[in-house]
Image (spheres, coloured by chain):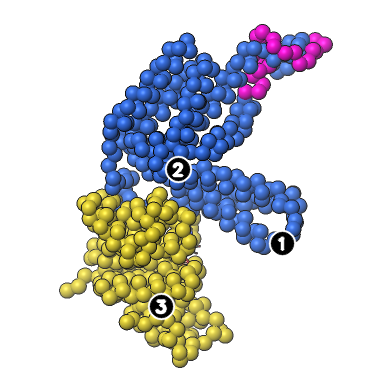
């Protein structure tokens, strides 16, 4: 047995993660709270929550909405570990680079909480002015916390909406709410495209693994990956073109029809009322 | 008087990047006829089928469908397009390309629904198609997770739900185990019994002989090298060798016809 090589491991891990993120459709069919609601109402309320998340400057509001998503996930039978892990695994990746520097006084000036280094003299370096002491500031910390909470909350909201709504119903609800047709078309194609892309990637790795026995150098692997990426983009472009032809052939004319109709019921009205009341109260009490 | 299903005259096709797909093709397909298109990889079988399905359009020459020219302009009219797509169904070579709905059931219901059939009828047709292919249990599965053979069956069911007059099939038996392959051949035979027109691109010469009344041979130069009754064409070793459909060391045997299922 040899050690699984790094590049292959990373890439297969990545495709696996994307696949699970995009295709976890079985959660959407569980008999949970959010799954039972009309997708149109769901989209509107989640949009309202997302807007509240985007505009608020109070960590309490963000925390409140975040906790709400956790409670909703539980009520919708989504395993907590699965849900939180999915959200928090992505956060450091995307926000670490932005949030981390902001805690220092040379980006966010303010009251020092903790002094890191004392320089001999202030430095001017490009657009940056480094004062004599590098400190972590209260304002910087607060900003970073708000930023991370905001990202985590909005990612949680999006993940929750997508996990509890079948993709086709989501697209259809968007069109019922008069979202632009082009946008919905692109979303629809993206879904198919990601899946084809993953398939191509997987098959390439399998094909390679079956051809090359034993260990190969990292340099050789990197060369292989970059050569293959170009090929993959090309191939998945051809595939997406074929998908389009197949849809045409089956009578697609840019407008999909659907079999079942949406029903806006009392529980949907209750849900909308609850969400708006929640947003109002939390904003009211936090300020 | 019978109107031909397709009349193709002096038709050539060049891909946008300059590659030749087809050269000066001529043939006529009559209703109820079963045609196999034989040719090596890259000879233009898929290209030809796509032109017959109104997905590509000839670079030179022309194609008529049901007695009328099949052009891009005409297909832009929704009414004409629906009428045409209602009559002609296409099974893609790669089933992954064809299956785009989130569940098998929606996949099968897609075409009839799209063509504007009443919802009750759509549901009936979809259910019938699923049971005709014995895949009721796949109903709520996600198409991309199915096995190759199951995908083929779902794709066939989605055409059956539409019940077109003309079936264009691009390598329907490729990548299947022998049992499933036989099963698909039986299915195609049942279509010909119903009087459907079948046009099938295929590699296996033996299968061609079982299902078709006419065989077209596409040469490596993307031209029609021959057309005629499969029994005669498939015995013309010179021709098959020229089209690279035979290896020199391979020969036909008298028991050829016993290797594949017969009609019952
Ligand atoms: N999208 C495309 N762009 C450019 N050239 C193409 C494209 N698709 C096919 N071709 C070229 O056109 C020719 C005919 O291809 P086609 O796919 O019709 O062959 P085929 O007989 O179906 O082959 P196979 O048995 O491998 O399916 C080939 O030379 C091929 O390289
Ligand atoms: Mg082909």
| Identity of the residue drawn at 40% across and 49% down | B102
| In the rendered image, the vertical position of residue A45 relative to residue B188, given as above or below | above
Please tell me the numbered disc located at residue A153: none
Mark 3 nearby-residue class (10 Å; few <14, some 14–19, many ≥20): many
Nearer to us of marks 2 and 3 is 2
Q: Secondary structure at mark 3?
A: helix
**Disc 1 residue lies near ligand 1 with CB under 8 A:** no
| Identity of the residue drawn at 43% across and 63% down | B150
Q: Find the distance from the CA under tag 2 to the CA under tag 3.
A: 45 Å
Question: In this view, which residue lies farthest toward the right?
Answer: A120
In magenta, the rendered stretch is A99-122
Horizontal and vertical percent position of residue B242: 50, 80
**Disc 3 residue lies near ligand 1 with CB under 8 A:** no
| Identity of the residue drawn at 70% across and 61% down | A212
Q: Which residue is mark 2?
A: A27
Q: Which residue is mark 3?
A: B208
Horizontal and vertical percent position of residue A206: 61, 58
Horizontal and vertical percent position of residue A246: 39, 55
**Label 3 lies in what chain?**
B
Mark 2 nearby-residue class (10 Å; few <14, some 14–19, many ≥20): some
Q: Is residue B68 magenta?
A: no
| In the rendered image, the vertical position of residue B109 relative to residue B181, given as above or below | above
Image-quadrant location for residue B170: bottom left
| In the rendered image, the vertical position of residue B147 relative to residue A170, given as above or below | below
**Label 1 lies in what chain?**
A
Q: Secondary structure at mark 1?
A: loop
Q: Find the distance from the CA under tag 3 to the CA under tag 1.
A: 40 Å
Does any portion of residue B14 appear in the rendered image? no
Q: What chain is colored blue?
A: A
Q: Which residue is mark 1?
A: A213
């Amino acid at each position: 047995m040899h050690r699984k090589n790094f590049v292959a491991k990373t890439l297969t891990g990545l495709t696996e993660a994307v696949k699970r993120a995009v295709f976890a459709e079985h959660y959407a069919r569980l008999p949970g709270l959010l799954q039972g609601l009309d997708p149109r109402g769901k989209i509107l309320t989640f949009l309202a929550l997302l807007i509240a998340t985007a505009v608020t400057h109070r960590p309490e509001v963000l925390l409140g909405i975040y906790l709400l998503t956790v409670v909703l996930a539980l009520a919708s039978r989504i395993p907590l570990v699965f849900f939180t892990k999915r959200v928090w695994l992505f956060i450091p990746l995307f926000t670490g680079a932005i949030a981390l520097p902001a805690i220092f006084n040379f980006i966010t000036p303010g009251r020092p909480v903790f002094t890191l280094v004392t320089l001999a003299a202030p430095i001017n370096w490009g657009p940056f002015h480094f004062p004599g002491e590098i400190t972590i500031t209260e304002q910087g910390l607060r900003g970073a916390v708000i930023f991370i909470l905001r990202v985590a909350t909005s990612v949680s909201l999006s993940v929750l909406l997508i996990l509890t709504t079948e993709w086709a119903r989501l697209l259809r609800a968007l069109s019922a709410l008069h979202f632009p047709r082009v946008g919905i078309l692109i979303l629809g194609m993206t879904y198919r495209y990601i899946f084809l892309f993953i398939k191509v990637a997987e098959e390439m790795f399998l094909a390679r693994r079956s051809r090359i026995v034993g260990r190969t150098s990292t340099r050789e692997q990197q060369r292989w990956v970059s050569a293959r990426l170009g090929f993959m983009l090309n191939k998945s472009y051809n595939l997406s073109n074929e998908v389009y032809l197949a849809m045409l052939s089956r009578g697609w004319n840019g407008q999909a029809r659907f079999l079942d109709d949406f029903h806006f019921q009392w529980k949907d009205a209750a849900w909308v009322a609850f969400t708006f009341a929640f947003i109002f109260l939390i904003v009211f009490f936090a300020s | 008087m019978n109107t031909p299903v397709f009349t193709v005259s002096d038709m050539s096709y060049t891909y946008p990047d300059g590659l030749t797909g087809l050269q000066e093709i001529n043939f006529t397909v009559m209703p109820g006829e079963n045609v196999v298109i034989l040719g090596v990889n890259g000879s233009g079988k898929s290209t030809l089928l796509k032109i017959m399905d109104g997905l590509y359009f000839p670079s030179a020459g022309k194609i008529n469908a049901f007695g009328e020219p099949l052009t891009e302009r005409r297909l832009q009219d929704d009414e004409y397009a629906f009428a045409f797509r209602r009559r002609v169904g296409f099974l893609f070579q790669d089933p992954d390309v064809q299956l785009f709905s989130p569940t098998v059931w929606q996949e099968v219901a897609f075409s009839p629904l799209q063509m504007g059939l009443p919802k009750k009828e759509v549901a009936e047709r979809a259910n019938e198609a699923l049971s005709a292919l014995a895949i009721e249990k796949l109903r709520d599965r996600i198409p991309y997770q199915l096995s190759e053979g199951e995908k083929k069956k779902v794709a066939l069911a989605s055409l059956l739900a539409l019940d077109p007059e003309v079936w264009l099939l691009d390598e329907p038996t490729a990548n299947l185990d022998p049992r499933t392959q036989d099963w698909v051949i039986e299915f195609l035979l049942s279509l010909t019994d119903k009087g459907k027109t079948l046009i099938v691109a295929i590699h296996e010469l033996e299968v061609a002989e079982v299902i078709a009344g006419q065989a077209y041979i596409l040469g490596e130069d993307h031209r029609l090298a021959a057309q005629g009754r499969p029994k005669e064409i498939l015995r013309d070793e010179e021709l098959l060798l020229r089209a690279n459909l035979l290896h020199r060391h391979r020969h036909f045997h008298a028991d050829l016809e016993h290797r594949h299922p017969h009609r019952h």
